[in-house]
Each structure stands twice: as structure tokens, then as C-alpha cells.
Image (cartoon, rainbow, N blue to C red):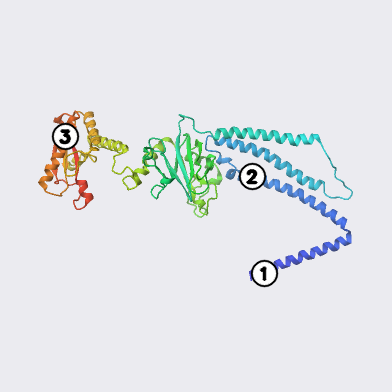
């Protein structure tokens, strides 16, 4: 029924228009076509002027209405060091193009009104005017020269690369359908080498695991940046054209397959500072969820974002990533929680070219852990401990002290941890320890006890050779009498085959 009514209404409208057209023709025949045409020209000229006024008012009001959302004014001023120069360039360009826009539209519609066809009127024709030629050639030339020079200065500032020795941090962003894969350098501050030929399911960036700089690189889910720190972003695409876009920082650079690009910028406002600025604007003091008055305000839920500014496919929208700008202490705390991709996802697997080797970072990590365990055991917290709790606290396992299978000959890697233990004993000259050897329950218990004693003696002999006074050391072989785990599984038996030391006195 509704469709029928709509159809009849349209039909009626067409009939009315046709009838009006017939009446107009009849009126023209009665009054004369010239008079009707002149009347129509005057009406159209007036309508042109009204349209011009409406258009200019609409453009000005809509620009003012949306300036805080789309034009980078109000709360959305640039949050980076270079952003102000780009905003200034856009403002100057908007000023000149706005003047041209207004003047040309006024002239266009004014001429339509001024030179409407009227009986007896005749337009003035100028074949040539040197003054006008100079004016409309010289003014655009001067304006364009100014804009080009200002733009060139801004370009040279914004696109300048890092100078040798300049303090900065470098990260990497790889675009693919449909996400950004972020990579940060670890403690060494250097991003490791990569090769697209090495890309696999467990190595999505093609990192070269023979490059030591890759060992501490990590892949976060969010982009975290310290405020006031210069950042250089390596930008890469893995499949199609993407665009690395940080709108609040005025950062926009194509990610091109096979052609690495970069961008350098310095964030100047933390996320919390930006939120506080948004708090002063009424449009951000409304609930984020209009259907839930109890939801947080828009300013409270604001986050910087990383987007893709190219239409790279139907799921293009999903490339959005959260960007957090924080203080240096907050960034350092976040950084300390990140885990190396190599250590968490590659180390020890068949794809690890260093499988079976003791790596330098593992030696450092173990040294730090060993020192921390000893310091913790030596600290008097004032809290009374049960005997078994105190014994556990003062017993420290030497994970990297290992022996050849079935014997008491130290492996080459063992010396690193024994050297660390020797350094600790040198640091604390009054420290006395008991070195203990343990085995699983495989084989004859008596033989296991003898083997564990031999291994403990070897460790004591090594430490003595490093200059540690023998009277500070004792060695005991416990065999399989003190298991640390079950002997029913291979993993459990491996944990039971261990070397430990216990702090006797300090």
C-alpha cells in the first residue's frame, strides 16, 4: 500500500509539472516570448545572488563547526615538534585559497546577475588590458613563490633524517593485510638485520638470527613512545601499498613493498596531557556510549592512534593500533616488561641456528639472576622464617654447571657460571658455602652417590683454582636422596640431575 501511494504521488507530481509547463507556454504566447524571457533572466539572476550568499555562509559556518574535528584547530593541535610548522603551512595556504575561493565565487555569481540578458543592454568587451594582465599574473606568482619557499623550508625540516650521534630511538613498522607489525630494539638500541627470504610462520619479519642485534628485539602490540624523545620509524610493506599515519602527530608516510621509507618526529604531549586538554571542550564531555549515561566521557577514553591511510583492502579499518605517549619513567617500566621475540618464540627450536649454544645474553641474564639470588639470601628482612624456608632461600641452583653424561668432567659452558660464583665469593670474603651434587634415581644408588660426590668435588676444585680459600668451601654428594621433582618423567629426572650451593654462613 505504501509503495502504491508513493507511486501515485510521483505520478501526480509529474502531471502537475506538465500542466505548469503548458500554462507557461500559453502565458508566453499571450504576453510575448521576449518579455517572459527577460522576466526569467531577472529571476534567475536574483536566485544566483541568493545562492552565492547561501553557499558562502554554508562554507564558512561548516568550516567553523568542523574545525575542531577535521581541520586541526581547538583540541586537535599538533602533538609533535614538527607539527606546528605543517599546521602553519596549511593555515597560510587556507588563507590564500580561501580569499581566492570567496572572490571568484562572488565574481562568478555577480557577473551572472550583472550581465543577465536585458533588452537593449550590451556587455563591454576588452580585447586587451595590460594592468589586468600584470595584476592576475603577478599576484599569483608572488603568492605561489611564497608558498613554495615556505613549503620547502617545512619539508627540509620535517623530512630531515637523524644526524650522526644524535640522541634518538628507532623502531620499525611493517604493514601487511591487515595489521601493523611493530618491532623495537632491545637494550642494545639497535634493530637487527632482516631478510625477506627468511620469512616463515615463526619468523614473520624475516629476522636474521645470526645477527646478535636481533636477540633482544621485541614485538609489542601497541606503539609506546616516551614524550620529548626523537623517534625514527622505519616503514616497510610486506604485500601491498600501505600508509603509516599518525594524525595527531602530523606523520604520514607511504609503506611501499620493496622500498623502505622512514619518518622522524618528536612527540610533545603525553596521552594524559592530551586528554586533559580535551576535557576543556564540551563536545568531549559527553558519554562515549550515548546509550549508557554511566559510561566514561569521550576525553577519558581518548587514545592516539596509528592508522593506514591507503585503501589497502576490505579489512583496511582493522589496521588501527593504539599509540601511547608516556613519561620516560613510565616508558622504562613498560620496556622492562617486554620479552625478546627470539628468546620467547625462537630460542631452542629447530629454526634456531644457535640451538645448543650458550649465548652471551643468557650468560648475562644468568649472572644477574645469580647475583640477585645471593643478595636476597643475604638480606635480613627481620621476618622469622621456618627452617625449611630458610634452607630453600639459601640454596641456589647452578643451572649451567653441567657434566659429561655419566662422568664428572665439566662441560665448556659450565665455566661461565662457576666464574660468576667465584666473583660472588670474592665480593663477599666471609661467605662460606656448601657445594652439593645430585642425581636422579636411575641406576645403582651407591654409584649415584659416588658420582654426585665426585661432581661436587670438581666444582670445589675449580673454585679453589680461582683463588677461593678451600676453608670457605665444602662439597657433598647426595646422590638421588634429595629429588627436586618427580623421577617418573624425563623432565623431572632432568631437574633432579643438578648442582647447587648452600650458604652456610656470611
Residue at the image position 70 percent from the left and 66 percent from the top = 10
* Crowd band around label 3 with a 10 angstrom C-alpha radius: few (<14), some (14–19), many (20+): many
First in residue order: circle 3 vs circle 2: 2
Q: Position of residue 202 (x, y in %)?
A: 38, 49
Q: What is the secondary structure assignment of the residue under circle 1? A: helix
- 416 or 206, nearer to the observer: 206
Q: Position of residue 295 (x, y in %)?
A: 48, 51
Task: Please give the residue where the numbered disc 1 appears in the rendered image.
Answer: 5
Task: Please give the residue where the numbered disc 3 appears in the rendered image.
Answer: 460
Q: Is residue 105 left or right of residue 151?
A: right
Q: What is the secondary structure assignment of the residue under circle 3? A: helix
First in residue order: circle 2 vs circle 1: 1
Q: Is residue 458 left or right of residue 224?
A: left
Q: Position of residue 221 (x, y in %)?
A: 42, 46
- 297 or 130, nearer to the observer: 130
In which quadrant of the rendered image does the C terminus lie? Answer: top left
The answer to whether one can see residue 221 in this image is no
Q: Which mark is residue 63?
A: 2
Using the numbered discs, state the Cα–Cα distance from disc 2 to disc 1 in whole angstroms.
40 Å
In which quadrant of the rendered image does the N terminus lie? Answer: bottom right
First in residue order: circle 1 vs circle 3: 1
How many callouts does the rendering have? Answer: 3
Q: What is the secondary structure assignment of the residue under circle 2? A: helix
Amino acid at each position: 500500500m505504501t509503495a502504491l501511494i508513493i507511486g501515485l504521488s510521483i505520478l501526480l507530481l509529474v502531471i502537475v509539472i506538465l500542466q505548469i509547463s503548458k500554462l507557461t507556454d500559453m502565458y508566453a504566447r499571450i504576453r510575448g516570448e521576449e518579455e517572459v524571457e527577460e522576466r526569467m533572466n531577472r529571476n534567475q539572476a536574483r536566485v544566483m545572488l541568493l545562492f552565492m550568499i547561501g553557499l558562502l555562509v554554508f562554507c564558512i559556518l561548516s568550516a567553523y563547526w568542523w574545525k575542531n574535528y577535521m581541520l586541526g584547530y581547538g583540541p586537535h593541535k599538533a602533538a609533535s615538534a614538527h607539527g606546528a610548522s605543517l599546521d602553519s603551512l596549511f593555515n597560510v595556504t587556507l588563507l590564500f585559497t580561501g580569499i581566492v575561493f570567496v572572490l571568484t565565487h562572488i565574481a562568478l555569481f555577480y557577473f551572472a546577475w550583472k550581465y543577465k540578458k536585458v533588452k537593449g543592454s550590451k556587455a563591454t568587451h576588452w580585447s586587451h588590458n595590460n594592468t589586468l594582465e600584470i595584476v592576475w599574473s603577478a599576484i599569483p606568482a608572488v603568492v605561489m613563490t611564497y608558498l613554495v619557499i615556505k613549503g620547502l623550508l617545512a619539508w627540509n625540516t620535517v623530512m630531515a633524517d637523524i644526524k650522526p650521534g644524535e640522541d634518538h630511538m628507532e623502531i620499525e613498522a611493517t604493514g601487511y593485510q591487515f595489521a601493523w607489525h611493530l618491532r623495537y630494539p632491545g637494550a642494545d638500541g639497535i634493530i637487527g638485520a632482516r631478510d625477506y627470504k627468511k620469512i616463515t610462520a615463526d619468523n614473520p619479519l624475516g629476522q636474521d638470527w645470526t645477527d646478535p642485534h636481533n636477540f633482544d628485539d621485541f614485538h609489542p602490540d601497541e606503539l609506546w613512545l616516551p614524550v620529548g624523545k626523537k623517534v625514527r620509524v622505519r616503514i616497510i610493506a610486506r604485500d601491498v601499498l600501505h600508509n603509516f599515519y599518525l594524525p595527531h602527530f602530523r606523520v604520514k608516510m607511504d609503506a611501499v613493498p620493496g622500498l623502505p621509507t622512514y619518518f622522524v618526529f618528536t612527540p610533545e604531549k603525553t596521552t594524559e596531557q592530551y586528554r586533559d586538554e580535551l576535557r576543556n571542550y564540551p563536545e568531549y564531555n559527553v558519554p562515549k556510549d550515548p546509550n549508557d549515561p554511566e559510561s566514561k566521557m569521550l576525553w577519558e577514553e581518548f587514545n592516539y592512534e596509528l592508522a593506514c591511510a591507503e585503501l589497502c583492502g576490505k579489512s583496511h579499518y582493522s589496521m588501527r593500533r593504539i599509540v601511547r605517549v608516556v613519561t620516560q619513567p613510565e616508558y622504562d617500566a613498560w620496556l622492562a616488561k617486554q620479552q625478546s621475540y627470539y628468546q620467547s618464540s625462537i630460542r631452542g627450536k629447530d629454526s634456531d641456528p644457535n640451538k645448543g649454544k650458550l649465548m652471551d645474553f643468557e650468560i648475562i641474564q644468568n649472572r644477574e639472576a645469580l647475583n640477585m639470588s645471593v643478595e636476597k639470601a643475604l638480606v635480613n628482612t627481620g621476618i622469622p622464617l621456618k627452617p625449611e624456608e630458610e634452607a630453600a632461600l639459601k640454596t641456589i641452583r647452578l643451572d649451567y654447571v653441567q657434566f659429561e653424561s655419566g662422568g664428572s668432567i665439566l662441560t665448556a659452558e659450565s665455566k661461565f657460571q662457576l666464574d660468576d660464583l667465584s666473583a660472588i665469593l670474592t665480593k663477599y670474603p666471609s661467605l662460606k658455602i656448601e657445594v652439593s651434587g645430585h642425581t636422579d634415581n636411575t641406576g645403582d644408588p651407591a654409584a649415584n652417590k659416588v658420582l654426585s660426590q665426585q661432581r661436587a668435588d670438581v666444582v670445589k676444585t675449580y673454585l679453589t683454582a680461582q683463588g677461593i680459600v678451600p676453608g670457605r668451601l665444602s662439597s657433598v654428594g647426595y646422590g638421588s636422596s634429595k629429588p627436586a621433582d618427580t623421577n617418573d618423567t624425563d623432565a623431572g629426572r632432568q631437574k633432579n640431575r643438578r648442582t647447587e650451593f648452600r650458604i652456610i654462613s656470611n
